[in-house]
Each structure stands twice: as C-alpha cells, then as structure tokens.
Amino acid sequence: MSERDDHELRISKIQDGTVIDHIAGGHAPDVLAILGIDGSTDEVVSVGMNVPSDRLGHKDVVKIEGRELSQDEVDVISLIAPAASINIIREYGVAEKHRVERPAVVEGVLSCPNHDCITTDGEPVTSRFEVLDDGVRCAYCETILRENLTEHISV
Ligand SMILES: [Zn+2]
C-alpha cells in the first residue's frame, strides 16, 4: 500500500458521512460556518487544519459523521474553497467523490447586504447571486460581495 492510499484511508475512516478534503489551509472554520456547525449541534465533526498536502502545501480537512451534504451546501463551499473535494462515505468506504464546481448562480443561501434590496425587504423573494470570477453579484440590486461571504450566509 502506498503512502497516498494510507492517507486516503486515514481521512475516510468514518462509517457514514462526508469528508471535505483539500480546503485551503486555515479555511475549515469558514466551511463549518457555511454548514451551520458551531458547536451547538450534536453532530460528530473532526477538523484537521494545516495538514501537509502535495497539491496545496497545507490544507484543511473536515469530517462530518452521519450527514451527506446537499448540492446547495456544496455550491457555497465552492465559493470559499474552490479546490475542495467532497467525499460521501457510506459503510467506511468512499461512495461518491466530487470536486466542487463553482455554480453560475447560488439561490437562497446568501443574504444581500443592501438593506434596500427586495430580498431583504420582508418580501417573499429568494436571494439569488450570480457567481463572478472574484465574488458574487446580487441578481436584484447588483450589489457585489467579494470578501467575507461566510458572514452573509443565511442557510
Ligand atoms: Zn440585493
């Protein structure tokens, strides 16, 4: 068994759940924020930070037991961790492996910082952001968000 296989095994050793690998070093807390994991839930979560990585230099790894991520969650993760790979684990094995892809739009997951925007005005309008190369743009008021996306997550 090569070292690489051994490493893959080590990170996938949960029975059922999701392993988010190849998060840029230091960004695991952002991923946890997106997923609403703040210590108040009883999910079993393991976080590896600044693990040596061939591809990224250092990477973070998040393992969540008993939970498979939704496509919406994966879409938002892609905005802050574009190199991430998502491994769905069933019965201790990798059942599905996805590289994240930046979606063209994200709906219902970010809230617009513009208080005059129709999406923040109490109207039943789902937020909708177009994904740009360096940020996201509100489809209603064209406000652009480039940084601190995690502060605008409304999932
Ligand atoms: Zn807006």
Image (tube, helix red, strand yellow):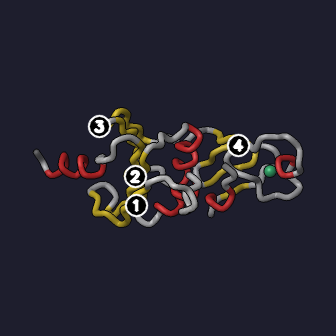
Residue named by callout 1: 47
Q: Quadrant of the N terminus?
A: top left
The foreground one among 111 and 55 is 111
Answer with left or right where residue 67 lies relative to residue 9.
Answer: right
* Picture disc at residue 63: 2
Q: Earlier in the sequence, mark 3 or mark 4?
A: 3
Residue named by callout 3: 93
Residue, x 78% and y 50% (percent of image)? 142
Q: For disc 3, does the CB lie below 8 Å from ligand 1? A: no
Dot 3: element = strand
Disc 4/disc 2 C-alpha distance (Å): 25 Å
Which residue occupies the extreme front position in the image? 42
Dot 1: element = strand
- Mark in the foreground, 4 or 2: 2
Q: For disc 2, does the CB lie below 8 Å from ligand 1? A: no
Q: Earlier in the sequence, mark 3 or mark 2?
A: 2
Amino acid type for the residue under numbered disc 2? Lys
Residue named by callout 4: 108
| Residue count near mark 1 (Cα–Cα under 10 Å), binned few <14, some 14–19, many ≥20 | some
Disc 4/disc 1 C-alpha distance (Å): 27 Å
Disc 3/disc 4 C-alpha distance (Å): 32 Å
Amino acid type for the residue under numbered disc 1? Val
